[in-house]
Image (cartoon, helix red, strand yellow):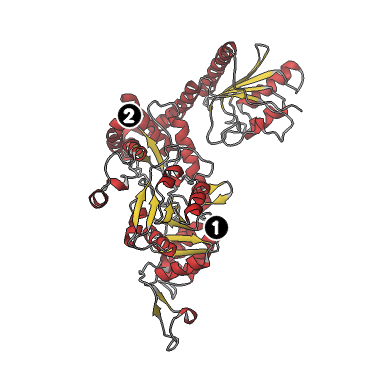
Amino acid sequence: METLSPLTVIPALMNDRDERFMALALEEARVAARRGDVPIAALVVRDGEVLSTGSNRKEKDPTAHAEILALRGAAEAVGTWNLRGCTLYVTVEPCPMCAGALVLARVDRLVYGCADPRAGACGTLYDIVRDSRLNHRCAVRSGVLERECARLLTDYFLERRKSRLARGGEERVKEMKFLSYGHQYIDEEDIRAVAEVLRGDWLTQGPSVDAFEKAFAEYVGTRHAVAFANGTAALHGAYFAAGVGPGDEVVTSPMTFAATSNAALYLGGSVRFADMDPATLCLDPGKAKEKITSRTKVIAPVSFAGYPADMAAFREAAAECGAVLVEDACHALGAKRGRTPVGKEADLTAFSFHPVKHITTGEGGMVTTDSDEYAERLRLFRTHGITKDPSKMEGEPDGPWSTEMQALGFNYRLSDIHAALGLSQMKKLDRFVSRRKEIASLYDGLFSSVRGLEIPPRHEGHAYHLYPLRVPAERRKEFILKLKERGIGGMVHYPPVHLHPYYRKNFGWKQGDFPATETFYSREISLPMFYGLSDDDVARVAEEIRRIADAG
């Protein structure tokens, strides 16, 4: 059977016809909105004739999507289930159910308006209609009257929110909670877990630390997970384990928190920054390779905002120069590359459990590795460089009390209290990440029709620690201040490390050294992004962003 390929070149007449039919679908969608349903509509066309229309009625029937209703009507009109020769027009990308129905109905062609980042099954999340494993494939054209279709959805959800607020009056607006850019989620299970430790025999290093490390290693899929007092300590420990010392260089991104580079300086090493890739917001592999020298000890890509950095490219670069690959995944717990969790592919991977991160221990960090040698060095480093293991001592132990300090380490241990909280939080991690993805999808849809905004890069395995929205640079401050006036906390991540006074004065970095990083920084606002954020909260943020954008 011949495989249909995606439609790439369409004559002008076809384009005009597509827009005319999509305009009809938009009118049907407005009818759905007026009766209180989500404004999505579809129509089936054959030989220039509209066979049937349908608009969402799923408030009463979960299967009554616009596409399904339109397909049912078309089948009734032609007297058969087989709809070869037909085109289905729909204002929003079909979901998996509707995409499957298009395949089963043998529809030749699909034309849709705006993508659905939450459920799109025709190219966004899945591509069911063009899956070569199935017995029928549709040609697809997307983006027809995209802005109009997206704006209709945005307006609908914002009006629903306004109506709810109106019923509560102006006082309700004044009493709305302040939305910070990040916030922890603590439930009764977490509280009980901590209380149990407080009532027990161990407060510092005890069984909860061991259990937390084991659970974390199992989640990531590594042999070892070594807990630290915070994310900075985890990075410090990772560089120590990698052997960073005086004269060694660490190649990393300036678009990160200062700890990523500071940790190298703590050990007497130096830092060579390379610019970010605007398409991912992570360290650019090509630019990183340009910074490698004979003194490069570590390459440290940062999975910024939760986007999983291109580890394959960095592994190749590290192998070529004999460097250790240390991933700063403090933003990326729960992110994946394909089916592989972040934390498994680098030689060492550092995580953070600050309250705004995916899970929290209050303060805390973790380093994962498959190397027994690295794990041993990590454990030594976090405990003053002191070992109690007789088999590892250089001298003959005096007795069971004997210890040896074998390296200049630090007191970077995580307490049992913090570990108990982390272990409880781990049980909810997948749920936390899933909700962050939902919030990001909502934001993506709500901002898709707003001029002057640029949404974050998408990745199937993105964990969305941050939602870094880009606005016009000359208006960034205005956006942040006006959001604050309306009870919304926008944050900026981060001032480029190379422009901090310490780095400028001591290493000679200056404005213009890393243009992609500096341009991103000038435009970035991190919007509220945390598990406890409701759909109404998201709509509230989007409404204010849109209001500010439209006023400019």
Label 2 environment density (alpha carbons within 10 Å; few <14, some 14–19, many ≥20): some
Image quadrant where one finds the N terminus: top right
Residue at mark 1: 219
**Which one is earlier in the sequence, the residue at label 2 or at label 1?**
1
Residue 256: mark in rendering: none
Residue 481 drawn above or below residue 385: above
Residue 198 drawn above or below residue 12: below
Cα distance, mark 2 to mark 1?
Answer: 42 Å
The residue depicted at 47 percent of the width and 36 percent of the height is 442
User: Of the residues shown, which amino acid type is indicated by label 1?
Assistant: Tyr
One can see residue 532 in this view:
no
One can see residue 247 in this view:
yes
Determine whether, in the image, residue 233 is placed left or right of residue 323: left
Label 1 environment density (alpha carbons within 10 Å; few <14, some 14–19, many ≥20): some
Determine whether, in the image, residue 83 is placed left or right of residue 467: right
- Kindly check if marks 2 and 1 are in contact, taking CB atoms under 8 A apart as contact: no
Q: Which of 31 and 247 is in front in this view?
A: 247
Image quadrant where one finds the C terminus: top left
Secondary-structure class at tag 2: helix
Residue at mark 2: 548
Secondary-structure class at tag 1: helix
Residue 495: give x, y in percent of width and height: 30, 44
Residue 493 drawn above or below residue 348: above
User: Of the residues shown, which amino acid type is indicated by label 2?
Assistant: Ile
Residue 415: give x, y in percent of width and height: 40, 68
Residue 504: give x, y in percent of width and height: 25, 48
Q: In which quarter of the image is residue 520?
A: top left
The residue depicted at 74 percent of the width and 16 percent of the height is 78
Q: Which residue lies furthest to the front in this view?
A: 294
Q: Which of 298 and 366 is in front in this view?
A: 298
